[in-house]
Image (cartoon, rainbow, N blue to C red):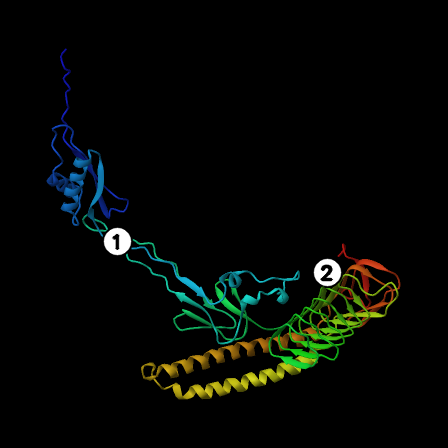
Amino acid sequence: MSAKTVSTTSVDGSFWVHFNEDRTQAILVVAPPQGDGNPVHVADVVQALEQMGVAYGIDENAIRETIRRATDMATKVQAVVAQGALPVHGTDAKVNYRLPEEAVTRPLSLLPDGSIDYLQLDPARYIQAGQLIATVVPANHGRPGRTLTFPPQTVPQRPGKDANLRAGEGVLASDDNLQFTAEVSGYVYLSGDKLCVLPAQPLSGDLQSTQEFTQTLVLSGNLLPGAQVRVQGDAAVGGRCEGATINVRGNCYLQAGAQRSEIAAGGNVLLTASVVGCTINTRRQVIALSAEAAIVGGRAVAFEGIEAYNIGTPDWTPTEVVAGVDTLGDERLFEIAEEIRQCEANILKINAALKPFVSVTSEATSPEKKETIHQLMTHRRRLEARLKDLQHEKRTITIQVNAPTRAEVVVHGVVYPGVKVTIGKHSYLVETEMQTVRFLVARGESRVQVRPLNKP
C-alpha cells in the first residue's frame, strides 16, 4: 500500500495599503505567505506608501511588526503604519448649576390666561440674592489635523459647542460670562438662552398684620381679617382672603377667592374661586379662570373689562360690575411721578460717582475700581431702562383716560337679576336671568347693549 503525496502550493505574502477617510493615516493589510512563499518586504511597503504620496510619518517598525504577526498567525493582519496629525475634536461647554438642573430647565407653570402660576413654582428653584446660580466650563475647540500626503492639507476638527448662556433679569454675569449670580432673591428659570431670576418672596404662614413687600408675594397661607398688604410686584394667595385689604402693583391671583375684602391691582385680578361681598379695583381685567369663580355681591371695577362665569345669585344679591372706568389712574400717575423723581436723582448720583474715573486710563485702574465702575454702570443702565418704562406708562395712562372705552363685560355662564353692569358712563340693570352674553357700548352709541357671546 503506497502513501499519498500531498502537494503544498507556495504563495508569496502580499499586502495593500489604503488611507483613512481624511488621509491622516495609512493602513497596511498583510496577507501571510503560504508554503515556502516569501514574506512581504518592508522596503516594498515603504515604496508603495511613497508612491501613494505619503510625505512623512512612515513607521518602519510598525510595518515590520505587522508582517511578523501575519506570518506567525498565518492570517491577515492590518495596522496603521503612517500617521499624520489627527484632528483633536473639541468638547462642549458644560453648565454646572448650584440648584437641581431639572428644576431650573423645566418650563414655568402657567395659569389658563398665560400668566405665571406662582403657587406651583418648585421650591427647588428658589435662591437668595448674592448666591451663585451656575458656573460654566468653557468649550474646548480642539485643533485641526494634517494629511499625510504632499502638500499637507488641513483637516478640520469638530469644535465644541459654547454654552450660549447669558444673564437675564435678576442675574449678574462675570466679565468672562462663566459665573452667574442672583442679583435678587427669587425663582431661577431659563428664558431661551437667558438665565433669569423671578423676584418673589414665598411665605407659608398666615398674614394678619400690615405688611409691605418690595417684590412678588407668594403666600400659600391665608390673608386673615385685618390684614393690610401692599405688594410692589405680583401677588398669589393660595389660602382664603377674608376681611383683608390687598394692594398689588402687578397681577393678583386669588386661588381660593375672597370674602368681604378690598382688592386693588395694577394688573389683572385672577380668580379660580368666588369673590363674595368684595370691592375690586384693577387697571387691567378681572378674569375668572374656572366655572367656580363667581362674582357675588360687592363691586368689581376693571378698566379693561371683566370676563366672568357667573355674576350675582338667583336671590337678587346686589352686585355691580364696572368696565372702562379707571379708578386707580390718578393714584398710579402720582406713584409714577415719584418713582421718576427717584430714578433721575439716583442717575445723577451715579454720574457724579463715575466722574473721577473718566480721565483715568484702563491700565491705571485697579481691579477693585474696575469692578466698582462696572457695578455703577450696570445699575445706571437698569435705572435708565426703568425710567424709559415709567415714561411710557405715564403716556399710556394719559392716552387711555381720554380715549373712548372698548371694555366689555363677558359672561360665560349666568348673570342674575339684580346685577348692575356699567360700561364707562352708561349702566344697565339686569332684570331677567341671562346666559352666555356680553355687555358693551358700541361705537357711537350712548347705551349698554347685550349681545350673545357667539355673535359679534
Q: Is residue 118 above or below residue 367?
A: above
Where residue 338 appears, as percent x and y from the top left, is 61, 84
* Residue type for callout 1: Gly
314 relative position to 29: left or right = right
Where residue 314 appears, as percent x and y from the top left, is 87, 63
Q: Which secondary structure lies at badge 2?
A: loop
- The Cα–Cα distance between marks 2 and 1, rounded to whole angstroms, is 63 Å
Q: Nearer the viewer, residue 102 or 27?
A: 102
Quadrant of the frame with the C terminus: bottom right
> In the rendering, which numbered label is found on residue 145?
1
Q: Is residue 77 above or below residue 154?
A: above
Q: Nearer the viewer, residue 189 or 438?
A: 189
Quadrant of the frame with the N terminus: top left
Quadrant assignment, res 239: bottom right
Q: Is residue 330 above or below residue 320?
A: below
Q: Is residue 72 visible?
A: yes
Other-residue count near label 1 (Cα within 10 Å), few / some / many at <14 / 14–19 / ≥20: many
* Residue type for callout 2: Ser
Where residue 306 appears, as percent x and y from the top left, is 74, 66
Q: Residue at x 48, y 74 (%)?
A: 131
Q: Is residue 314 above or below residue 171?
A: above
Mark closest to the chain's N terminus, 2 or 1: 1
184 relative position to 250: left or right = left
Q: Residue at x 49, y 87 (%)?
A: 349
Q: Nearer the viewer, residue 12 or 65?
A: 65
Judging by the rendered image, the residue that carries numbered circle 2 is 290
438 relative position to 432: left or right = left
